[in-house]
Structure formats: C-alpha cells, structure tokens
C-alpha cells in the first residue's frame, strides 16, 4: 500500500564511496505496520543489516524522514539486490512499501501490490 506521506518522504544520506549506484533500493525494518519502540526498531534494523550482508549486497545507511524531520526511520540503501528480493525483504520486515532509485529517479513500490509510483529526481529528495 502506498500511503500519501511516502510520496513526500525526504532522505538523510551521504553519497556512498564510489557515488550513487545506477540502481538501488531503500528498505527499512522500522515500525512494521505500526509504531514500535526504539529497542524493537534497533533489533529489527540490525537483523535486516545482517541479512543484507549475507546476501552479498552493497549497503549504505539512508534515513527516510518527513520533510520537517519530525518523523525519521533509519534504513538501508542496497545495491545488487533484485526488485523481487527487495520487495520480499520489505514484506518480511512488515513494510508497506520500499523505495527504488533507478537512473536517478526515485519511485515508491508497494510491497504487497507491486504498485509503483514515480516520485521525482532522487537527489532533490536528499536533505543532507
């Protein structure tokens, strides 16, 4: 399910060593279907990081946030993972959607429906 606020998401991210990959996904394990505490989010985030590393993916920290920065969810930029695998991880970690950056364009993709909505140029959504 693509919620309207996903289309407004901004990102706190530093350009990874070697630059932005041509295609990558942004996945979080935070707040699976509902708001949960910091400890639960931290454990889920660590589990996701380990799973991404085991898959041999190139990972880098990206935090999705509301434009006013009041709501933030740490996640991972992941290169070298198929869309199907990225969506499966999103579902596994209770997420409604993931983000994809391809050819410099940001899209949001529903984990269950596969619905895709193009948002805008990726670098315009980076706050820092």
Image: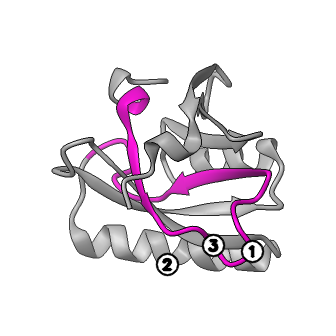
Q: CA distance from mark 2 to mark 1?
A: 24 Å
Q: Position of residue 98 (x, y in %)?
A: 57, 42
Which quarter of the figure is the C terminus placed in?
bottom left
Is the residue under label 3 in contact with that under label 1 (CB below 8 Å)? yes
Disc 2 packing (10 Å; few <14; some 14–19; many ≥20): few
Mark nearest the camera among 3 and 2 is 3
The dot on residue 16 is: 3
- Which range is magenta? 6-34
Residue at x 77%, y 79% (from the top left corner)? 54
Q: CA distance from mark 1 to mark 3?
A: 6 Å
Q: Position of residue 33 (x, y in %)?
A: 36, 42
Give the labeled residue for mark 1: 18
Residue at x 80%, y 57% (from the top left corner)? 81
Q: Secondary structure at mark 3?
A: loop
Is the residue under label 2 in contact with that under label 3 (CB below 8 Å)? no
Give the labeled residue for mark 2: 46
State the residue in front, 125 or 83.
Answer: 125
State the residue in front, 13 or 82.
Answer: 13
Q: Say left or right for 38 vs 50.
A: left
Is the residue under label 1 in contact with that under label 2 (CB below 8 Å)? no
Q: Quadrant of residue 127?
A: bottom left
User: Where 122 falls versus 43 (above or below)?
Assistant: above
Q: Earlier in the sequence, mark 3 or mark 2?
A: 3
């Amino acid at each position: 399910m693509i919620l309207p606020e996903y289309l407004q998401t901004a990102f706190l991210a530093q350009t990874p060593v070697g630059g932005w990959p041509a295609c990558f996904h942004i996945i979080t394990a935070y707040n699976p279907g509902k708001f949960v505490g910091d400890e639960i989010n931290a454990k889920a985030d660590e589990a996701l990081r380990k799973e991404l590393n085991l898959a041999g993916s190139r990972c880098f920290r990206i935090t999705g946030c509301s434009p006013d920065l009041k709501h933030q969810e740490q996640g991972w930029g992941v290169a070298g993972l198929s869309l199907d695998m990225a969506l499966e991880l999103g579902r596994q970690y209770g997420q409604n959607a993931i983000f994809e950056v391809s050819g410099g364009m940001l899209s949001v993709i529903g984990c269950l429906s596969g619905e895709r909505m193009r948002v805008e140029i990726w670098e315009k959504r980076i706050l820092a």
